[in-house]
Image (cartoon, grey):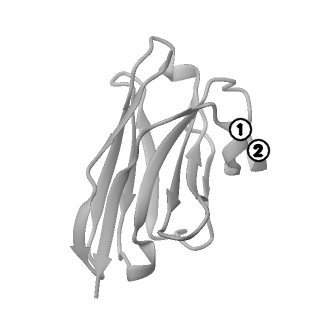
Amino acid sequence: QVQLVESGGGLVQAGGSLNLSCAVSGRTFSTYAMAWFRQASGKEREFVAAITWNSLNKYYADSVKDRFRISRDNAKSTVFLQMFALRPEDTADYYCAADRQGWRIGRQLMTAPTYGDWGQGTQVTVVS
């Protein structure tokens, strides 16, 4: 079983930055597609960003494009989400997710049902 542990959340002022990390157990992390989703209080979980196993393809929600950056370090079995120019509407619990069918690309990586393994989440609060 794959375990995912997010870290790096916290409280930040609008316009600030945060860096999230997700450490993944398992010896085949390098074959997984990875993603970040978020869920604000009272709202449905929404896609934020995704990255293919080889980092060649990255996908972003329109709401975070140009402000967030997803990356991964396969040697450390970790995926990152750098968040810049944060806004109050970015406030949410952020979850990382793994797709062990690592061959998927495109819009499939932007939907929650694609991912079979999820972390517990890390809270991000942006105050104005």
For this view, does 19 lie left or right of residue 113? Answer: left
- Of residues 6 and 80, which is closer to you in this image? 6
The answer to which of marks 1 and 2 sits earlier in the sequence is 2
Residue type at numbered disc 1? Thr
Q: Nearer the viewer, residue 2 or 58?
A: 2
Q: Nearer the viewer, residue 30 or 99?
A: 99
Q: Report which quarter residue 59 is drawn in.
A: bottom right
Tag 1 and tag 2, C-beta contact below 8 Å: yes
Q: Is residue 128 left or right of residue 4?
A: left
> Image quadrant of residue 125?
bottom left
Q: Find residue 101 and report its horizontal and vertical position in percent.
A: 69, 24
Note whether 68 is above or below 57 in the view shown.
Answer: below
Foreground: disc 1 or disc 2: 1
Q: Position of residue 3 (x, y in %)?
A: 43, 24
What is the crowding at mark 2: few (fewer than 14 residues within 10 Å), some, or many (at least 20)? few
Q: Residue most toward the bottom?
A: 128
Residue under the image location 63 percent in, 44 percent down: 57
Total numbered badges shown on the rendered structure? 2
> What residue did someone put label 1 on?
114
Residue drawn at (76%, 44%) of the image: 108
Type of the residue with mark 2: Gln
Few, some or many residues within 10 Å of mark 1 (<14, 14–19, 20+): some
Q: Quadrant of the C terminus?
A: bottom left
Which dot marks residue 108?
2
Residue 45 located left or right of residue 70? right
Q: Secondary structure at mark 1?
A: helix
Q: Return the residue found at the far top.
A: 27
Residue lying at 57% horizontally and 69% vertically, measured from the top left:
43
- Label number found at residue 83: none
Percent across and percent down for residue 13 are 23, 79
Query: Does 17 sit above or below residue 108?
Result: below
